[in-house]
Image: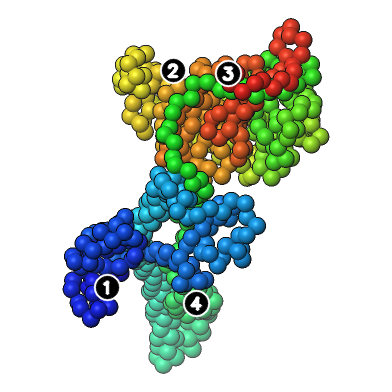
């Protein structure tokens, strides 16, 4: 933090308030010292800043951290480090590109490194803002989840209570039915007992009467006539005893109540951030930034000898992990191979017209889409043969690409996501409805009025047949958003290690550079006869198919060389190095 008082005056025992800060001397100055500082020869070119404009913290040291009393005097281009006069002979004496820091820092504010540092800081701050927003959104989601779960628990509780009440009503009804049944049975048995008891008492009274008051004859007749009645009564008593049972009601608790140990659990589901983070790749250039300019022509360097092979239309291009250049010719039904020195090696015949091609990273396999057939073919790059084919419905004449985990195949209405064995994993469906506007809106913005044929629900604009779009999905293959392309995009390839992709166009001789993170077209470059052909990229080159050859460009779009093949009745391809300045 800058000092509050003037530092030269403080050294003399005075404490006037500082008003300026010298960035070279790293000292606070009062108004008097400021005037002296501006006129002294050694400090008149120093940069003075108002104290109010100085950040609270300045994390810059102009002295060497190893030799703290020595300032930085040199810059080593080879190691991209600044050093003092003690570090230079120890660590950089053998380096060829060591220069004075005064020379190296000339126009540094306009250098690519300075702009890259600003861009890197902006990138980090934007990422931190996204993280902060993500934290707040996550907190809001947790609070919303809490309310949702509380409602779910309340609902479960109410359902359990409702179920218990229903079970209680069932048990009470069952108890009443069983009680009524057996009480009624007991009452019926009791009536039978009373009837038998009355009959037995009547026979007893009759027998006692004849015993006490009747004659012997009457007693004899009474005994004989009552015997069948007594036997019948005794038989009924026996039957009654056999049917009689002591009834009792008991409640047997269900064992299922022990299973209700909880209503559920609260689980935590952690998922990665919804936005990917790739560290900003700082450039090393120390030269001033050159203003962007439109490239209108290319310099033709040399052709690649195809050794008599006929090459009519290059529809797909890819480069293997070992830098083998592989490209397809749909008309000839051929797949061609060149080594890492652009030397043509061999070709194979494809069972179907090969349309687009992509290598599977980390393997020796490439996948090829077919022109008119619903197949993708697996190509063994080392053995140079088709190893197998897989049916992918409606995939004829569309693009194909691959990552280390998945194969992406374009079809008529969606994108099929396959595993590396060709098994379908999921489908990314594209969203279109009927249009609302009469004319194509992207074309209308360019002064043209072609009739609109489709309506994009995400962009909310009408599109003609040529203004198809570029779609983006996240790493989980979740559809995110499209952008409109000025020209109909045909093939696309990401440039490894960057946030840029290149696209070829369907009918126009252009390639477009796409910023993947910002999702906009950066620039458009003309590549003659490239309309409707494949494009691929490595970390150093861009390969563009044309109607007669393959153009190899650098990552800025400048042409480096051409792979030329025999066309029609031409005798052969050839290798020629043209003088500098010849345009292709």
Residue 8 badge: 1
- 297 to the left or right of 578: left
Q: Mark 4 highlights which residue?
A: 244
Residue at 69% x, 41% y: name it.
Answer: 321
Task: Quote the CA–CA distance across marks 3 and 4.
Answer: 119 Å
- 203 to the left or right of 401: left
Taking depth in this image into account, of 293 and 267 the one nearest to the observer is 293
Label 4 residue SS: loop
Residue at 52% x, 71% y: name it.
Answer: 66
Please provide percent x and percent y for residue 297: 52, 20
Task: Quote the CA–CA distance across marks 1 and 2.
Answer: 74 Å
Task: Quote the CA–CA distance across marks 2 and 3.
Answer: 33 Å
Q: Mark 2 highlights which residue?
A: 465
Q: Are marks 4 and 2 in contact (CB under 8 Å)?
A: no
**Residue depth check, mark 4 versus mark 2: number of the one nearer the observer:** 2
**Residue depth check, mark 2 versus mark 3: number of the one nearer the observer:** 3
Residue at 41% x, 81% y: name it.
Answer: 197
Taking depth in this image into account, of 189 and 34 the one nearest to the observer is 34
């Amino acid at each position: 933090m800058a000092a509050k008082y003037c530092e030269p005056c403080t050294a003399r025992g005075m404490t006037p308030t500082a008003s300026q800060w010298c960035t070279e001397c790293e000292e606070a100055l009062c108004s008097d010292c400021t005037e002296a500082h501006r006129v002294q020869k050694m400090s008149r070119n120093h940069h003075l800043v108002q104290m109010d404009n100085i950040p609270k913290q300045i994390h810059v040291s102009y002295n060497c951290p190893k030799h703290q009393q020595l300032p930085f005097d040199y810059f080593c281009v080879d190691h991209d480090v600044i050093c003092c006069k003690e570090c230079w002979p120890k660590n950089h004496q053998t380096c060829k590109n060591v220069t004075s820091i005064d020379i190296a820092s000339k126009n540094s504010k306009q250098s690519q490194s300075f702009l890259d540092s600003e861009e890197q800081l902006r990138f980090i701050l934007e990422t931190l803002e996204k993280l902060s927003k993500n934290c707040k959104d996550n907190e809001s989601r947790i609070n919303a989840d809490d309310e949702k779960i509380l409602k779910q628990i309340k609902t479960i509780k109410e359902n359990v209570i409702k179920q218990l009440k229903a079970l209680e009503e069932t048990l009470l009804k069952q108890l009443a039915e069983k009680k009524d049944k057996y009480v009624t049975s007991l009452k019926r048995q009791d009536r039978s007992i009373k009837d038998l008891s009355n009959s037995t008492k009547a026979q007893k009274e009759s027998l006692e009467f004849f015993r006490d008051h009747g004659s012997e004859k009457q007693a004899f007749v009474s005994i004989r006539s009552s015997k069948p009645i007594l036997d019948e009564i005794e038989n009924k008593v026996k039957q009654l005893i056999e049917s009689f049972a002591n009834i009792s009601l008991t409640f047997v608790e269900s064992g299922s109540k022990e299973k209700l140990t909880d209503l559920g659990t609260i689980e935590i589901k952690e998922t990665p951030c919804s936005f990917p983070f790739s560290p900003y790749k700082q450039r090393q250039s120390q030269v001033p930034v050159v203003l962007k300019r439109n490239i209108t022509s290319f310099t033709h360097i040399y052709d690649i000898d195809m050794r008599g092979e006929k090459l009519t239309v290059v529809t797909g291009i890819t480069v293997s992990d070992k830098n083998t250049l592989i490209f397809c010719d749909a008309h000839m039904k051929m797949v061609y191979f060149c080594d890492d020195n652009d030397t043509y090696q061999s070709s194979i015949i494809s069972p179907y017209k090969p349309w687009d091609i992509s290598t599977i990273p980390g393997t020796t396999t490439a996948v090829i889409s077919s022109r008119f057939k619903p197949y993708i073919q697996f190509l063994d790059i080392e053995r140079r043969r088709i190893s197998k084919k897989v049916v992918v419905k409606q995939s004829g004449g569309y693009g194909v690409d691959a990552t280390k985990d998945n194969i992406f195949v374009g079809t008529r209405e969606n994108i099929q996501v396959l595993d590396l064995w060709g098994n379908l994993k999921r489908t990314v469906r594209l969203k279109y409805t009927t249009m609302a506007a009469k004319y194509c809106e992207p074309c209308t913005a360019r002064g043209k009025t072609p009739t609109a044929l489709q309506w994009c629900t995400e962009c909310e604009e009408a599109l003609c047949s040529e203004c198809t779009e570029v779609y983006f999905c996240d790493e989980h293959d979740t559809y995110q958003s499209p952008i409109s392309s000025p020209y109909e995009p045909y093939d696309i390839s990401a440039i490894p290690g960057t946030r840029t992709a290149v696209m070829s166009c369907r009918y126009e001789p252009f390639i477009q550079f796409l910023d993947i993170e910002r999702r906009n077209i950066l620039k458009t470059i003309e590549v003659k006869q490239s309309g409707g052909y494949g494009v691929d990229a490595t970390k150093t080159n861009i390969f563009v198919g044309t109607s007669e050859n393959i153009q190899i460009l650098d990552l800025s779009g400048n042409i480096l060389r051409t792979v030329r093949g025999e066309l029609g009745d031409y005798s052969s391809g050839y290798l020629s190095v043209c003088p500098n300045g010849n345009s292709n």
